[in-house]
Image (cartoon, rainbow, N blue to C red):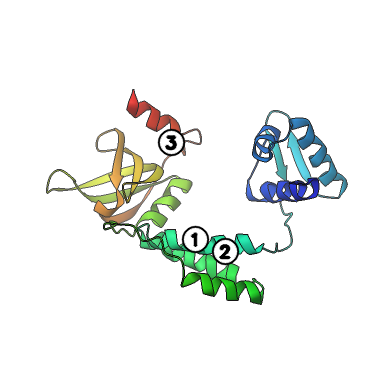
Amino acid sequence: MNRLTRITSILIRLQTKKITTSLELAKHFGVSVRTIYRDIRTLEEAGVPISSENGVGYSLVEGYHLPPISLTEQEANSLIISEQFIKNQGDSSVQHDFESMLAKIKSVLKSVQKDNIELLENRISTNSKGNTPKSTWLSTIQTAMINGHVINLSYQSGYKSEYTDRDIEPLAVYFSNNAWIVVANCRLRNDLREFRLDRILAVHATNETFKVQSDFSLFDYFASLIH
């Protein structure tokens, strides 16, 4: 990657993340931290308003936006791969959200890119063997997780033919064995629990909120299950 491409990519990452560190950028681009310092200085000299704070990182000044960015042919084509995976991941709510976003992206593509995407759509498939459990709650749970909203679930147990109502504080979601799973603080059990989205019968918003655990890590959570 040449320097101009890297500097442009750094600017894109600054816009897509609230804050990022020089170490994160150095690891991502495979260069030294000193090189990142020089690249940031180049952006600042070009008039890009970058805010920096020692020990925290870099961010773009609120209100600054990049002009629309043209996609390369390979980037445009990768959208179709993503679309196929989304279609087969089982949750209709996130599928609807992705299709809405993809339509907006397609609207600004060049004519030749649109033609290529249309060709690829009929020639790429990610269908997997077996049935993927269906759900409709992922988008709602993600929103509650980000905003710290307690949600009430009507849930069917996997090992008993019984239904329970649970108030949960959603912390994370992951995809495993063809099913979406939410990790949450369960107020009924007063402990961390996992809930498969395809076993959720209904989701109801509550007026309660909880403090979002910004330091919660799925990696650490999975590691704790092993020990």
Q: In front of the other: label 3 or label 1?
A: 1
- Residue depicted at 15% across the width and 43% down the height: 159
Q: Residues within 10 Å of mark 3 (few under 14, many from 20)?
A: some
The tag on residue 218 is 3
3 and 1 marks in contact (CB < 8 Å): no
How far apart marks 2 and 1 lie (CA) works out to 7 Å
> Camera-side residue: 180 or 149?
180
How far apart marks 2 and 3 lie (CA) works out to 30 Å
- Residue depicted at 48% across the width and 70% down the height: 121
The C terminus, quarter of image: top left
Upstream in the sequence, badge 2 or badge 3? 2
Q: Which residue is denoted by mark 1 in the rendering?
A: 81
2 and 1 marks in contact (CB < 8 Å): yes
Q: What type is the residue that disc 3 sits on?
A: Leu
How far apart marks 3 and 1 lie (CA) works out to 25 Å
**Picture layout, residue 148 above or below residue 91:** above
Give the percent coordinates (x, y) of residue 97. 46, 63
- Residue depicted at 31% across the width and 47% down the height: 177
Q: Which residue is denoted by mark 2 in the rendering?
A: 77
Give the percent coordinates (x, y) of residue 90. 34, 58
